[in-house]
Amino acid sequence: MPELAEVEFFRKRWNSGLGQRVVRVGIHGQTRVFRGINEAEFAKTLGGSCPIGSAAHGKQMIFRFDRATLGVHLGMTGELRVESPDFTPGQHDHLVLWQKDAALVFSDPRQFGRLLFQKGASDPPWWKMRPPDLLSQEFTREELAAFLQRRKAAPVKAVLLMQERFPGVGNWMADEILWRARLHPATPGGRVKDVAVLWKTIRGVCRDALRVIGTKWGDPPDTWLFNHRWRDGGPCPRCGVELSRKEIGGRTTCWCTRCQVD
DNA sequence: TCTCGTGTTTCTTG
DNA sequence: TCAAGAAACACGAG
Protein backbone atom coordinates (compact mmCIF):
# COMPACT_ATOMS: atom_id res chain seq x y z
CA MET A 1 0.00 0.00 0.00
CA PRO A 2 2.70 2.50 0.87
CA GLU A 3 2.86 5.60 -1.32
CA LEU A 4 3.86 9.14 -0.43
CA ALA A 5 1.26 9.75 2.26
CA GLU A 6 1.31 6.28 3.80
CA VAL A 7 5.09 6.47 4.09
CA GLU A 8 4.77 9.73 5.99
CA PHE A 9 2.19 8.14 8.27
CA PHE A 10 4.48 5.21 9.12
CA ARG A 11 7.47 7.47 9.68
CA LYS A 12 5.53 9.46 12.27
CA ARG A 13 4.65 6.22 14.02
CA TRP A 14 8.30 5.29 14.57
CA ASN A 15 9.09 8.86 15.61
CA SER A 16 7.64 8.03 19.02
CA GLY A 17 10.90 6.16 19.60
CA LEU A 18 13.19 9.12 18.93
CA GLY A 19 15.54 9.90 21.78
CA GLN A 20 15.20 6.45 23.34
CA ARG A 21 18.15 4.09 23.23
CA VAL A 22 17.78 0.70 21.54
CA VAL A 23 18.34 -2.01 24.15
CA ARG A 24 18.00 -5.01 21.86
CA VAL A 25 17.93 -5.69 18.11
CA GLY A 26 15.98 -8.58 16.62
CA ILE A 27 16.43 -9.47 12.95
CA HIS A 28 15.37 -12.15 10.50
CA GLY A 29 18.65 -11.60 8.66
CA GLN A 30 18.06 -14.22 5.97
CA THR A 31 15.03 -12.47 4.46
CA ARG A 32 15.16 -10.44 1.26
CA VAL A 33 14.61 -7.13 3.03
CA PHE A 34 18.19 -7.32 4.35
CA ARG A 35 19.77 -7.92 0.93
CA GLY A 36 23.18 -6.26 0.73
CA ILE A 37 23.42 -5.79 4.50
CA ASN A 38 25.95 -7.38 6.81
CA GLU A 39 23.55 -8.55 9.51
CA ALA A 40 26.14 -8.98 12.25
CA GLU A 41 27.46 -5.46 11.79
CA PHE A 42 23.91 -4.12 11.48
CA ALA A 43 22.80 -5.63 14.79
CA LYS A 44 26.00 -4.69 16.58
CA THR A 45 25.85 -1.06 15.44
CA LEU A 46 22.19 -0.43 16.17
CA GLY A 47 22.30 -2.18 19.55
CA GLY A 48 22.77 0.55 22.15
CA SER A 49 22.33 3.31 19.58
CA CYS A 50 19.77 6.09 19.78
CA PRO A 51 17.43 7.29 17.01
CA ILE A 52 17.72 11.07 16.81
CA GLY A 53 15.71 12.08 13.73
CA SER A 54 13.88 10.99 10.63
CA ALA A 55 12.75 12.20 7.23
CA ALA A 56 10.64 10.89 4.37
CA HIS A 57 11.06 11.52 0.69
CA GLY A 58 8.74 9.86 -1.78
CA LYS A 59 8.52 6.23 -0.79
CA GLN A 60 11.87 6.35 0.99
CA MET A 61 12.44 6.96 4.69
CA ILE A 62 15.60 7.66 6.60
CA PHE A 63 16.01 7.20 10.35
CA ARG A 64 19.11 8.85 11.75
CA PHE A 65 20.79 7.22 14.74
CA ASP A 66 23.67 8.64 16.75
CA ARG A 67 26.05 6.20 15.08
CA ALA A 68 24.37 5.09 11.83
CA THR A 69 21.56 5.73 9.35
CA LEU A 70 18.78 3.31 8.56
CA GLY A 71 16.89 3.57 5.27
CA VAL A 72 13.47 1.96 4.98
CA HIS A 73 11.52 1.25 1.80
CA LEU A 74 8.21 -0.47 2.44
CA GLY A 75 7.74 -2.08 -0.98
CA MET A 76 4.16 -3.21 -1.48
CA THR A 77 3.27 -4.74 1.85
CA GLY A 78 5.72 -3.29 4.36
CA GLU A 79 4.68 -1.40 7.48
CA LEU A 80 6.19 0.17 10.57
CA ARG A 81 4.51 -0.48 13.90
CA VAL A 82 5.08 0.33 17.52
CA GLU A 83 4.49 -2.51 19.97
CA SER A 84 4.88 -2.98 23.71
CA PRO A 85 8.36 -3.79 25.12
CA ASP A 86 7.38 -7.45 25.73
CA PHE A 87 6.53 -7.91 22.04
CA THR A 88 7.29 -11.29 20.44
CA PRO A 89 8.01 -11.04 16.69
CA GLY A 90 5.84 -12.95 14.23
CA GLN A 91 6.85 -14.61 10.98
CA HIS A 92 7.01 -11.40 8.92
CA ASP A 93 8.45 -9.07 11.56
CA HIS A 94 11.92 -8.84 10.03
CA LEU A 95 13.33 -6.13 12.28
CA VAL A 96 12.49 -5.24 15.87
CA LEU A 97 14.25 -2.47 17.80
CA TRP A 98 13.37 -2.90 21.46
CA GLN A 99 13.52 0.17 23.63
CA LYS A 100 12.75 0.63 27.30
CA ASP A 101 9.10 1.56 26.70
CA ALA A 102 8.32 0.19 23.24
CA ALA A 103 9.35 -2.01 20.35
CA LEU A 104 9.76 -0.53 16.86
CA VAL A 105 8.77 -3.16 14.29
CA PHE A 106 9.37 -3.41 10.55
CA SER A 107 7.15 -6.03 9.02
CA ASP A 108 6.73 -7.07 5.37
CA PRO A 109 5.03 -10.33 4.25
CA ARG A 110 6.04 -10.11 0.58
CA GLN A 111 9.57 -8.88 1.24
CA PHE A 112 9.52 -6.37 -1.62
CA GLY A 113 10.56 -3.78 0.92
CA ARG A 114 14.17 -3.08 1.72
CA LEU A 115 16.37 -1.83 4.52
CA LEU A 116 19.48 0.23 3.83
CA PHE A 117 22.17 0.72 6.40
CA GLN A 118 25.26 2.87 6.75
CA LYS A 119 27.55 3.31 9.72
CA GLY A 120 28.45 6.82 10.83
CA ALA A 121 26.48 10.01 11.16
CA SER A 122 26.65 11.31 7.58
CA ASP A 123 23.76 10.87 5.14
CA PRO A 124 24.23 8.00 2.65
CA PRO A 125 24.65 8.66 -1.11
CA TRP A 126 21.18 7.32 -2.02
CA TRP A 127 19.62 9.96 0.22
CA LYS A 128 21.78 12.81 -1.10
CA MET A 129 20.86 11.95 -4.70
CA ARG A 130 17.08 12.03 -4.27
CA PRO A 131 15.07 13.90 -6.93
CA PRO A 132 13.21 17.14 -6.14
CA ASP A 133 10.15 16.78 -3.95
CA LEU A 134 6.91 17.20 -5.94
CA LEU A 135 5.77 19.98 -3.60
CA SER A 136 9.08 21.86 -3.78
CA GLN A 137 9.86 24.85 -5.97
CA GLU A 138 12.36 22.79 -7.97
CA PHE A 139 9.55 20.70 -9.45
CA THR A 140 8.45 23.09 -12.21
CA ARG A 141 6.09 22.94 -15.17
CA GLU A 142 9.11 23.17 -17.44
CA GLU A 143 10.73 20.15 -15.77
CA LEU A 144 7.52 18.19 -16.17
CA ALA A 145 7.17 19.13 -19.85
CA ALA A 146 10.77 18.15 -20.56
CA PHE A 147 10.37 14.80 -18.81
CA LEU A 148 7.16 14.02 -20.71
CA GLN A 149 8.99 14.76 -23.95
CA ARG A 150 11.84 12.45 -22.99
CA ARG A 151 9.30 9.70 -22.30
CA LYS A 152 7.11 10.69 -25.20
CA ALA A 153 6.15 7.16 -26.28
CA ALA A 154 5.31 5.73 -22.84
CA PRO A 155 1.73 5.92 -21.51
CA VAL A 156 1.43 8.86 -19.13
CA LYS A 157 0.28 6.40 -16.44
CA ALA A 158 3.64 4.60 -16.66
CA VAL A 159 5.50 7.92 -16.70
CA LEU A 160 3.87 9.07 -13.45
CA LEU A 161 5.09 5.90 -11.73
CA MET A 162 8.75 6.71 -12.52
CA GLN A 163 10.26 7.45 -9.12
CA GLU A 164 13.26 9.28 -10.59
CA ARG A 165 10.91 12.20 -11.39
CA PHE A 166 7.74 11.58 -9.36
CA PRO A 167 8.97 10.33 -6.00
CA GLY A 168 6.16 8.90 -3.93
CA VAL A 169 3.57 8.49 -6.69
CA GLY A 170 2.21 4.95 -6.70
CA ASN A 171 -0.61 3.22 -8.48
CA TRP A 172 -3.60 4.79 -6.76
CA MET A 173 -2.08 8.30 -6.76
CA ALA A 174 -1.30 8.05 -10.48
CA ASP A 175 -4.90 7.03 -11.22
CA GLU A 176 -6.22 9.82 -8.99
CA ILE A 177 -4.02 12.43 -10.70
CA LEU A 178 -5.05 11.37 -14.22
CA TRP A 179 -8.71 11.23 -13.26
CA ARG A 180 -8.65 14.72 -11.75
CA ALA A 181 -6.70 16.08 -14.74
CA ARG A 182 -9.20 14.38 -17.11
CA LEU A 183 -6.36 12.68 -18.94
CA HIS A 184 -6.63 9.18 -20.39
CA PRO A 185 -3.97 6.95 -18.77
CA ALA A 186 -2.83 5.50 -22.12
CA THR A 187 -2.06 8.95 -23.58
CA PRO A 188 1.58 8.94 -24.68
CA GLY A 189 3.73 11.29 -22.57
CA GLY A 190 4.58 13.38 -25.62
CA ARG A 191 0.91 13.97 -26.42
CA VAL A 192 -0.16 15.47 -23.11
CA LYS A 193 -1.70 18.76 -24.24
CA ASP A 194 -2.11 20.70 -21.03
CA VAL A 195 1.06 20.20 -19.01
CA ALA A 196 0.15 23.06 -16.67
CA VAL A 197 -3.06 21.30 -15.59
CA LEU A 198 -1.19 18.03 -15.03
CA TRP A 199 1.48 19.83 -13.01
CA LYS A 200 -1.09 21.54 -10.83
CA THR A 201 -3.02 18.30 -10.33
CA ILE A 202 0.07 16.32 -9.31
CA ARG A 203 0.75 18.85 -6.57
CA GLY A 204 -2.88 18.97 -5.54
CA VAL A 205 -3.14 15.22 -5.11
CA CYS A 206 0.15 15.12 -3.16
CA ARG A 207 -1.10 17.84 -0.83
CA ASP A 208 -4.50 16.19 -0.33
CA ALA A 209 -3.00 12.74 0.25
CA LEU A 210 -0.60 14.07 2.89
CA ARG A 211 -3.41 15.96 4.60
CA VAL A 212 -5.91 13.08 4.70
CA ILE A 213 -3.68 9.99 4.97
CA GLY A 214 -0.27 11.29 6.04
CA THR A 215 -1.40 12.63 9.37
CA LYS A 216 -3.85 10.07 10.74
CA TRP A 217 -4.75 7.52 8.05
CA GLY A 218 -8.13 9.06 7.45
CA ASP A 219 -10.42 7.76 4.71
CA PRO A 220 -10.39 9.89 1.57
CA PRO A 221 -13.85 11.32 0.78
CA ASP A 222 -16.10 9.61 -1.77
CA THR A 223 -15.52 12.53 -4.14
CA TRP A 224 -12.06 11.02 -4.85
CA LEU A 225 -11.54 8.23 -7.36
CA PHE A 226 -9.67 6.40 -4.55
CA ASN A 227 -12.80 4.89 -2.97
CA HIS A 228 -14.20 3.61 -6.27
CA ARG A 229 -11.22 2.20 -8.14
CA TRP A 230 -10.82 -1.12 -6.34
CA ARG A 231 -13.60 -3.10 -7.91
CA ASP A 232 -14.95 -3.65 -11.39
CA GLY A 233 -17.97 -1.59 -12.29
CA GLY A 234 -17.57 1.15 -9.70
CA PRO A 235 -19.13 4.51 -10.62
CA CYS A 236 -17.13 7.59 -11.57
CA PRO A 237 -17.60 9.96 -8.59
CA ARG A 238 -17.85 12.88 -11.02
CA CYS A 239 -20.25 11.71 -13.73
CA GLY A 240 -21.55 8.33 -12.53
CA VAL A 241 -20.43 6.41 -15.63
CA GLU A 242 -19.07 2.90 -14.93
CA LEU A 243 -15.30 2.99 -14.45
CA SER A 244 -12.98 0.97 -16.68
CA ARG A 245 -10.16 -1.21 -15.39
CA LYS A 246 -7.32 -2.54 -17.49
CA GLU A 247 -3.57 -3.03 -17.30
CA ILE A 248 -1.79 0.05 -18.62
CA GLY A 249 1.91 0.65 -18.18
CA GLY A 250 2.19 -2.74 -16.50
CA ARG A 251 -0.19 -1.87 -13.67
CA THR A 252 -3.89 -2.21 -13.05
CA THR A 253 -5.37 1.12 -14.04
CA CYS A 254 -8.80 2.58 -13.41
CA TRP A 255 -10.30 5.45 -15.36
CA CYS A 256 -13.55 7.02 -16.48
CA THR A 257 -14.31 6.56 -20.16
CA ARG A 258 -16.39 9.72 -20.27
CA CYS A 259 -14.25 12.13 -18.23
CA GLN A 260 -10.85 10.94 -19.41
CA VAL A 261 -10.35 11.18 -23.13
CA ASP A 262 -7.13 10.84 -25.08
C1' DT B 1 -6.85 -24.24 -6.66
C1' DC B 2 -6.16 -20.16 -9.06
C1' DT B 3 -5.54 -15.28 -9.86
C1' DC B 4 -4.31 -10.88 -8.51
C1' DG B 5 -1.71 -7.13 -6.38
C1' DT B 6 -1.07 0.72 -3.78
C1' DG B 7 6.77 -1.77 -5.98
C1' DT B 8 11.40 -2.07 -7.79
C1' DT B 9 15.11 -4.29 -10.24
C1' DT B 10 16.91 -6.74 -13.97
C1' DC B 11 16.62 -8.67 -18.32
C1' DT B 12 15.10 -8.52 -23.16
C1' DT B 13 13.72 -6.33 -27.21
C1' DG B 14 13.49 -2.63 -30.45
C1' DT C 1 22.90 3.95 -26.01
C1' DC C 2 18.38 4.71 -24.69
C1' DA C 3 13.55 3.65 -23.97
C1' DA C 4 9.71 0.48 -23.18
C1' DG C 5 7.86 -3.83 -21.77
C1' DA C 6 8.07 -8.26 -19.37
C1' DA C 7 9.59 -11.20 -15.82
C1' DA C 8 10.95 -12.05 -11.27
C1' DC C 9 10.84 -11.55 -6.40
C1' DA C 10 7.21 -13.94 -2.04
C1' DC C 11 2.98 -14.17 0.13
C1' DG C 12 -1.88 -13.29 1.58
C1' DA C 13 -6.56 -12.34 0.18
C1' DG C 14 -10.55 -13.27 -2.40
Image (cartoon, coloured by chain):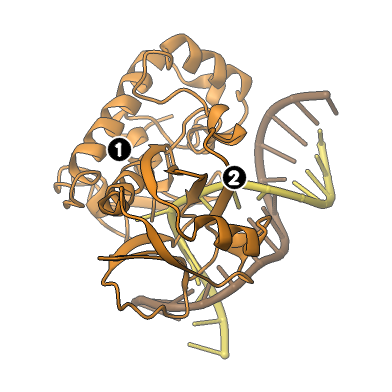
Chain colours: A orange, B yellow, C brown
Query: Whole-percent x and y of residue A95?
Result: 47, 66
Residue under the image location 29 percent in, 72 percent down: A85
Query: Few, some or many C-alpha atoms within 10 Å of disc 1 (few <14, some 14-19, many ≥20)?
Result: some
Q: Looking at the picture, does residue A96 appear above or below residue A176?
A: below
Query: Whole-percent x and y of residue A225?
Result: 25, 45
Q: Earlier in the sequence, mark 1 or mark 2?
A: 2
Query: Few, some or many C-alpha atoms within 10 Å of disc 2 (few <14, some 14-19, many ≥20)?
Result: some
Secondary element at tag 2: strand
Looking at the image, can residue A254 be seen? Answer: no
Residue under the image location 46 percent in, 34 percent down: A167
Residue toward you, B1 or A132: A132
Instruction: Specify the amino acid type for callout 1.
Output: Arg
Query: Whole-percent x and y of residue A212?
Result: 18, 43
In this image, A82 relative to A153: left or right? left
Look at the image and tell me in which quarter the C terminus of chain A lies: top left
Q: Pinpoint the chain carrying mark 2.
A: A
The residue at the far top in this view is A142
Residue toward you, A193 or A225: A225
- Disc 2 designates what residue? A118
Instruction: Specify the amino acid type for callout 2.
Output: Gln
**Both on one chain, marks 1 and 2?**
yes
Look at the image and tell me in which quarter the N terminus of chain A lies: bottom left
Residue toward you, A70 or A8: A70
Residue under the image location 56 percent in, 19 percent down: A147
Residue A258, image quadrant: top left
Q: Looking at the picture, does residue A71 appear above or below residue A56?
A: below
Q: Which of marks 1 and 2 is in front?
A: 2
Residue toward you, A201 or A47: A47
Query: Whole-percent x and y of residue A61?
Result: 43, 43
Q: Residue A258 carries which label?
A: 1
Determine the CA span between mark 1 and mark 2.
50 Å
Does the CB distance between marks 1 and 2 fall below 8 Å? no
